[in-house]
Amino acid sequence: MDLFSEINSAPAQKRMEELAEELDRLNYEYYMNDRSLVTDEEFDAMMRELQDLERQYPELASPLSPTKRVGGEVNKSFRQVEHRFPMLSLGNTYSIEEIEEFESRTRKLLDGTSFTYTCELKYDGVAIGLTYRHGRLVQAVTRGNGTVGDDITLNAKTIPTIPLRLRGNYPDDFEARGEVVYPFEPFIAMNAQREANGDEPFANPRNAASGSLKLLNTAECAKRKLMFCMYFMMGPDESKLPATHFERLEWAKQMGFKVQPYIQECKDIDQIKSFIDHWDRARWNLPFGIDGIVIKVNQTTLWDKLGLTAKSPRWAIAYKFKAERVSTPLESISYQVGRTGKVTPVANLQPVWLGGTTVRRATLVNADFIENLGIHIGDHLFIEKGGEIIPKVVGVDKEKRLPGAMPVSYIQRCPECGATLVRINGEAGHYCPNVDGCRPQILGRLEHFVSRKAMNIESLGPERLEMLYNVGLVRDIADIYDLRREQLIGLGAEQSASIQDKSADNLIAAIEASKQVSFERVLFALGIRYVGEVGAKKVARFFGEMDAIMSAREEDFSQVEDVGEVTAKAIYEWFADMRHRAIVERLRAAGLQMKGQWTNNSGPLDGLTFVVSGVFEHYSREEIKADIEKHGGKVSGSISSRTSYLLAGDKMGPEKRKKAEKLGITIITEKEYLEMCV
Ligand code: IVH
């Protein structure tokens, strides 16, 4: 920084500190106290002002700035780190008798000492440990195998209930542990959005939370609306922490952690049992999932005395709730046809109340599932809902079967187009082979093609596509590029959704803009079975252009990382079909990207800045710097808040490491670097 900008940066620094403090306070009030002190617009305006200032004065930007909540940085890999204190798990049981045994055993072991228990919720999410030094978050690590976990610090910073800087008094050095959960409401909305985009929905909030913490793009993680529930505090010096678990959590609350209020000190087994009883019923009113109750000895000074078993402490136990189960009559079976032609049988059930919602439908997965359960027409089915929130058919209530009931016979023909169904690749599922004539397949493919992660033609939603299909203007994906403005105007008048001049212009413009979408996304948009977003990227990068893919042999596809035999066959067969080749040629003629654009210093390290230090095994320092630039990254001589990674070889200077740690910059090894460049 030259002298001039240094002088100029003083007011900026003051403003940045002011904004950071205010945004932290507003965030705290909103997420911890449910209080909105400003409108969303005002909040966003302040956030944008701070982001702009940080862009202008990157050297003044703090790694703990509230702008980190919005994300923007990219994780290239998740460094494995050893836990300072192992992350133990808890002994768990589904039986109240075992809880009684735990209680009497603990009482005996403590031999007359007076003590109490705490009962709290067992959050159903992903366990993480947060290290705080001098009141600042320095690292967030997943549980992993209990000894080593993944460094997910950047993503953790996007979770509003994880404090970046602590309030009031706090121990100088400690670890806060808790569970990252995905509350039901945002989970359901996110899954619906995924389905609309043609992505596989998550099976349950726990998987979704875990997947979110491993997202490479921190901005995506920020959108996930995760919540951190703190349940444990520990440190290298226990004498600096309160002597009861209850007080530790109370203190944590004052520091700014989200500690759920549902914790109770219990004196005896009766109080423990009534806490369990209450939550077994009340759990469905919570906005997030729990799968049981955790009971801990409250006096932390007694923990050492009680000690550990092989994996878990003797001073705590988890009681797990049994999945709720009901039985309800099967009214009928519907068969849904997806965009790949896959047929999914769905049970239409007599509506039944289960775990907080009314269940009307549940998937029957495939023909084998129906056969294995031996489902007969009119059977009562057992439906369960664990932490999964998605109801599952788990069995048949045979006692309620009507005499003479016939086994369900699976459909032979497509319910949509009448084609004879087939089973492919030894899969359990049935498929409709009428790829070009079966309505839901065609519409599904069109929807996938225009979806956000594919061609991203936002103004072409499912209703419009269906309308264009119905009037015969769009029958395949290439038809979209033949659409003309005059054809669109006035369409849909009978559904009072008529396309006006302006919206026809917008639609044509959006279609035009999609011609700039990258080659790898074009490949994904084609909707080849088993080829997801990542797979398409890898295939695109491996072959570089469409012509190379079209002339490749089946075994060539297996050379691509993570492409197995089944996928290789699917890609090969897709391109072997002359109708598909004709569509690709029409897309090419329309001007879509048929070639990757990764040369000229752009690549997997785009936008990342590295500082290289020490001696490496496979490269000289100069070679490694050239390699970074070749892959689109930048090399800098000194560490600053702008550094994305410190690439550390042998004999790296200790000051560099110290500085990187201070600024919260991820340190990576040569091996981790090489993995980033694939
Ligand atoms: S205490 C050493 N409290 O349940 C004791 N754990 O196997 C540390 N969990 O992986 C755990 N809610 O992630 C504790 N209120 C709670 C919890 C809780 C959920 C998870 C935790 C751990 C597993 C127990």
Image (spheres, helix red, strand yellow):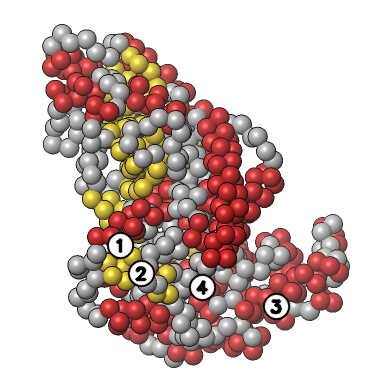
Q: Earlier in the sequence, mark 3 or mark 1?
A: 3
**Between disc 4 and disc 3, whose residue precedes?**
3
Q: Which residue matches tag 1?
A: 656
Residue 523 on image: x %, y %: 51, 77
* Residue at image coords 50%, 66%: 1
For badge 2, the amino acid type reads Val
**In screen coordinates, is 293 left or right of 431?**
left
Instruction: Kindly report the distance in space between the C-alpha atoms of the residues bearing marks 4 and 1.
Output: 42 Å
**Residue under pointer 4:** 524
Q: Amino acid at mark 4?
A: Phe
Q: Decide: marks 2, 4 in contact (CB < 8 A)?
A: no
Secondary structure under tag 3 reads helix
Q: Please give the label number shown on residue 611.
A: 2
Q: In front here: 274 or 295? A: 295
Which callout, 4 or 1, points at the residue further toward the start of the chain? Answer: 4
- Check disc 1: other Cα within 10 Å, few if <14, some if 14-19, many if 20+: some
Point out the frontmost of discs 3 and 1.
1
Q: Earlier in the sequence, mark 2 or mark 1?
A: 2
Cβ–Cβ under 8 Å for marks 2 and 1: yes
Q: Residues within 10 Å of mark 3 (few under 14, many from 20)?
A: some
